[in-house]
Image (cartoon, rainbow, N blue to C red):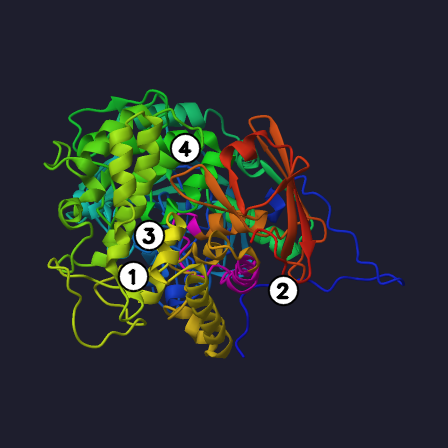
Amino acid sequence: MRRWLGTLAVVIACGGDDAPAPPLPEVTDPLPLVDPTIGTGGLGFGYGSSFVGAAVPHGLVKLGPDTSGDFGTVAFQHFSGYFFDDDTIEQFTHLHLHGAGASDFGVLAVMPTAAFDPGKRRASDYRAPFAKADEHATAGRYAVTLASGIAASLTATARGAHHVYTFPGGGGALVLDLAAALDGGDVTDAALHLDAATQTIRGHLHAAGGMSGRYGGYDLYFTARARTAWTAAQVWSDAQPPAIGVDAVGTGVGAALTFAGGPVELQLAVSLVDAAGADANLAAELPAWDADATYAAAQAAWRAKLGTVAITGGTPAERRTFYTSLYHAFLMPTVIGDVDGRYRLHGMAAPATAAGFTPMSDFSLWDTYRTVHPLYAWLAPTSARDSSGSLAAFAAIGGCPRWPIAIGESGTMLGASCDVVIADAAARGVVDHAATAWPLLRAAALDATAPPMGRGGRDQVEPYIQYGYVPAAVGRSVSHTTEYAHDDFALANLAELQGDTAAATALRARSHGWQMLFDPAVGFLRARNADGSFPTGSFDPLAMTEDYAEANAWHSLWMAGIHDPDGMATLFGGRAGAIAKLETFFTEARRDWDEADPSAANFPRPYYWHGNEPDLNAAFLFAQLGRPDLTHTWARWIIDTHYADTPAGVAGNDDGGTLGSWYVFAALGLYPIAGSADYVVSTPIFERARVVVDGHELIIDAPGATSARRYVAGVTIDGAPLSTPRLTQADLRTAHTIAFAMSDTPTTWGQ
């Protein structure tokens, strides 16, 4: 039997009459329950890739350690720059992704050292070992004492950072490395200038990482200042060895500043627009030398985001997992504009100024459209508004993007997930940018000729229009088709909101075309040729082939069911047939989980695979097909076995908070139908949750809810019975109490 990753319910202390202990009280401050190290461990496909350093919600600056250990700095274990099992810090860098499955950023490095050695140029030459006991990460701050005795305390603002270094001997040196980048990245040009009179460092670099390099990379401008004067300074580049000076230009650029006393404090701000923007960001966000005040402001920003939900009950581990998952949901996307609203996108002739939104990027859309953005539309409407406005701005330049990073589009993954995000926000009441985006999205999806700005994520829509599916000659054709089908469902909803009934009718009809890929001879979706035939020969539903994106036939079968459960039932001769197939999917997954060697968690799973996106909705499809009791069984199984409050407690790359947002929804007893106003009702894990958004308070009440008491016997909304497992955004915004009656055994509620 393999060890479950999830932490099971704690043993409940009982009194003499065997009455259960009262539930843990309502959380009054979520921040002590946030542990940024959750999801920083795990191996291979089980690596959570969580960011561990200092950041504020949606902050461009994510200041934290880049580490090395038994795996060196290999990208596959260092997508966020950090791996929990490592024992060495290479450097502290200012930009990172969270939960991504690709390497980028890790630029603009600072590293403290007792003394500068001019024979060494890179901050990585000063890598320093550390012990886990000497490392402390919280929401908004990262602190560590290195084995050398040097202590670092780092905190952040949206566009800036405050470093504090304490040296055992009182003084030391800071190495600034403008050549640093995570594995696979490169800084192709950089410059810096030191001004000793004002204790200021200014510069820029041009970086291209594993994804940002696909559009040519980005320019990052920075302005930094030291609190005390440095006593010596050397600069260098690949063409210039370390020497006393004030300027360095080219590649391999760096500088070392020596300070006579301590602590040494450094404030730094960045801009993706220009040097003036970096100056303005520093002045606006770091006006005083007060690291504690900066940290307090970061904490306040996190409390504003996380405090929308106050939970009662659950186990200590579940409470930590919940609030850390919610924290993860706001690390990306990332602010890319300056404090004055100016921003720059790749392809723009000049910077633009945002109106009605804060420009953001770093959208892992193929992942986040499923859970993160519906979460924003419910709990953080401002984040939903900023996401929609930013994606509309990208769409106007080069079509709706698939995975924009920094200032440009990486083109990673497939589908028009951007359509779903904008449609979802509008359907749930965040309509600010729907009218602007709609003509762009409609043209990309429906016009026979590609519009001037391109089709963006709809790059295969022309054969899709012709055949009703993406044919086998196009790689990953099944996944293209199921993604486009869900995109069309979402866009049809947006079309209705915009009053375009003709487009809505066409898109809704097209959203069912995925069924054309069902081959009754094998019982799965598979690639279909343009002439309508299926390939001949053997078929293995467990094989991860080029017909599917990061998935096999079992994983890919269920995705379109979230928007078309009736179509799913039709394929299997009725709901009972579809439910039986889905039960096989999960029972085989549990058997595999229980019987496989523990190392199997580091590899793709053959059946339900929570570490990847196409089947994230599968447990909730039972309820859509008429068996909510099976949703209660399997959603809770996923919670208990695939999550924990440990470094390996995320089942795979969190992908910008996707898995974290899944947990938040599931723990509250809901799952979103992305691109619509609807939710599937599941089973809460907490006895009570108080949700306050824009002044409206909603109580989700589930007395007695535990891992064992997981079944729903009835639901009422403000006292009125709910007969089907479905709620709308309007319900969540107007209701005051959603009450669940919980049961130890399966019930017929909602069937």
Q: Secondary structure at mark 1?
A: loop
Quadrant location of the C terminus in the rendered image: bottom right
Which labelled disc corresponds to residue 550?
1
Estimate the spatial distance between the alpha carbons at disc 3 and disc 4, rounded to whole Å: 49 Å
Query: Pointer 1 and pointer 3: residues touching (CB < 8 Å)?
Result: no
Which residue occupies the extreme right position in the image?
16
Question: Which marked residue is nearer to the observer: mark 4 or mark 1?
Answer: 4
Estimate the spatial distance between the alpha carbons at disc 2 and disc 4, rounded to whole Å: 37 Å
Q: Give the mark nearest the N terminus, 2 or 4.
A: 2
Q: Give the mark nearest the N terminus, 1 or 3.
A: 3
Disc 3 crowd rating (10 Å Cα; few below 14, some 14-19, many 20+) is many
Residue 146, percent from left and from top: 49, 56
Quadrant location of the N terminus in the rendered image: bottom right
Q: Give the mark nearest the N terminus, 4 or 1.
A: 4
Residue position for label 4:
427
Q: Residue at x 42, y 23 (%)?
A: 284
Q: Give the mark nearest the N terminus, 3 or 4.
A: 3
Q: Residue at x 37, y 63 (%)?
A: 572
Residue 7, percent from left and from top: 60, 63
85 is higher (above) or lower (below) than 621:
below
Residue position for label 3:
123
Question: Which marked residue is nearer to the observer: mark 3 or mark 4?
Answer: 4
Could you say which quadrant of the image residue 307 lies in?
Answer: top right
Which labelled disc corresponds to residue 162?
none
Residue position for label 2:
8
Q: Is residue 571 visible?
A: yes
Q: Amino acid at mark 3?
A: Ala
Q: Secondary structure at mark 4?
A: helix
Magenta residue span:
630-658
